Image (cartoon, rainbow, N blue to C red):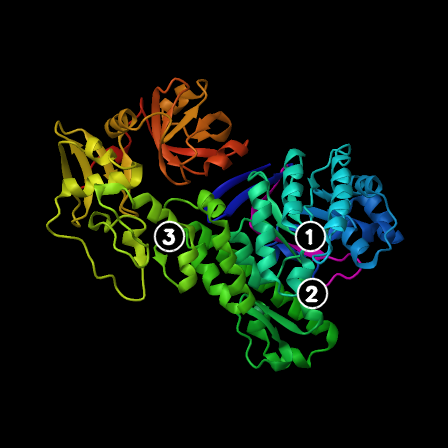
Amino acid sequence: MFEIKAKDGLGRIGKLSIGKKKVETPTLMPVINPNKIVIAPKDMSDYGAEMLITNSYIIYRTQKLKEVALEKGVHKMLDFDGVIETDSGSFQMSAYGDIEIENKEILQFQKDIGVDIGTFLDIPTHPDEPRRKALSDLEITLERARESFEFDLNLNGTIQGGTHLDLRKKSAEEMSKLPFTVNPIGGVVPLMMEYRFSELVDIILTVKGNLSPARPVHLFGAGHPMLLSLSVLLGCDLFDSAAYVLYAQDSRYLTSYGTKKLNEMKYLPCNCPVCRKYTAQELINENDQKRLELLSSHNLYATFEELKIIKEAIHEGNLFELVETRIRGHPRLLLAYRRIKDYYDILEEYDPFTKRSSIFYTGEESNLRPIVKRTKDRIKDIKSKKYDQHLFFGKFPKELEFTYPFGQCEMEEERRDKGDPELKDEAIVKVIADYQFGPNVGQKLFHDVVVKRSKTGMIRYVFDKNGAMLATIRARDGLFTPNIEGLKRLKDIIPYPRYRIIVDDEAAPFIKEGANVFSKFVLSLDNNLRAYEEVIIVDSKDNLLGTGTLMLSPREVKAFERGMAVKTRWGIDKNTTPENQIEE
Ligand code: GUN
Ligand code: ZN
């Protein structure tokens, strides 16, 4: 089971539940080679690992390991009680071609040793494989996928298709129909080894566009910290790292901005326990085994540190900014990021409408963010003026001076066209309403009103002429949260089904009392809505129930069985929370 807690771009902070165990995503599974353990599984939680991946095929064909695993189970064998995922030997098969095992045999074995998530025997397609072979291998992979469900085991459904995007699409569509727990994107290791990141972006976004958004996505074989933020932005949730050991074997030092050769380093630019204790020279002077352990340890710390940076960026809503700094770590990453311009529709659909932090312009790639075109489209018809505006370089309505994203946008130079002191407060609130709820809503919503400013001089409250509060402007982003009276007006002004989320009549009494709306109770919703917009909650007959913040994009609301769809602010029968009071 998977649910989303926070979003930015296509990235999400999620909660993956496997039985009673829970993992917060995005996360990374350190790869454990049971024949060659460098960092003990029991120490992995010190790094932040909640989940490991090991290879069931290696265990299966190593007699001693096989006996222990069958007798005690894989958790006791590795001495790790978190989530253990196993791969199936597919990768050995593609690399060495000598694997002698059947799909059902390795699935049964994974079940027998008690893994939390198993993997069926997919055929990894090499990126340079011609289409005909890629297709015939995909057909075998899909056939094996379909025969994998007789074992009562949580499963990875690996998506193949090589660099043939039509095959990736077909693969993602077919996998969506089958009850897999996670869908890895497979066959991409050679692309990453060769820095073919543009093709990787095409594959990830093609898969994301055709796979249910309720599925966690694992980018198989990705564990270099440099690549993590971009992959998360594009919607990947899980990663695995053999890199921490493989690079250490080669005396390479991982950072979020690239790989360094230890022998050429003088300072260790990191504050992990290893880098605090050792100088580069001391590490170089260690014996091979000790150096391997220390460097693997640093590499793993650096990787988990980057994951925390990424999660904080999702929380704050500045993941695009983070990625735009990370892609400067390698010119091929910079080039790859520019591919997002061909995937505007999917990025725009999932990217939230408002964010906690300001927008920073980091360079010309910032123009490719979906918010630039979205804003242009949204604003062109408001205020009966034509705005041919560009978020970063255009003119925008002066009334939106404090409204997201215009008022929270930092450029190289300070913006000069500040608000117009001649503007009347009533005119300002009307334009903000037009921007937020659609052209011509403001005029009707805020007809004959009294606008009040806060102590700090910001427009804050709109009342009707009888003193009933219609809406509040949120200080953070200058957007409205409607109160009940304003909500009633909005519902009358905006024709059904715009701006609405329609819930099951069974849930209606609870929502009227202020309960949150869970995805499973949603009958339908306006597909033009975006995550973090304020919505009108109604029952099946368009009776008003309340209002709140939409937490997911519409496609996610429809796909998820679990989790919150709307964080309710007001239920129509319960609207006396402290937010209804004016702050003095
Ligand atoms: N490890 C890295 N890539 C792959 C893949 O495509 N399939 C499987 N099963 N494991 C992998
Ligand atoms: Zn370090």
Specify start and end residues of the magenta stretch as a single range: 20-38
Q: Earlier in the sequence, mark 2 or mark 1?
A: 1
Q: Quadrant of residue 299?
A: bottom right
Q: Which amino acid, by three-letter code, is at mark 2? A: Val
Image vertical order of residue 226 relative to residue 316, above or below? below
Say the numbered circle drawn on residue 162.
1
Q: Secondary structure at mark 1?
A: loop
Say if disc 3 is inside 8 Å of ligand 1: no
- C-alpha separation, residue under disc 3 versus residue under disc 2: 41 Å
Residue topped by disc 2: 245
Residue topped by disc 3: 372
Q: Which amino acid, by three-letter code, is at mark 1? A: Gly
Instruction: Tell which residue pokes out farthest to the left in this image.
Output: 422
Q: Is residue 82 visible?
A: no
Q: Secondary structure at mark 3?
A: helix
Q: Secondary structure at mark 2?
A: helix
Front label number (2 vs 1): 1
Q: Quadrant of residue 497?
A: top left
Q: Which amino acid, by three-letter code, is at mark 3? A: Val
Q: Earlier in the sequence, mark 3 or mark 1?
A: 1
Q: Residues within 10 Å of mark 2 (few under 14, many from 20)?
A: many
Image vertical order of residue 571 relative to residue 223, above or below? above
- C-alpha separation, residue under disc 2 versus residue under disc 1: 26 Å
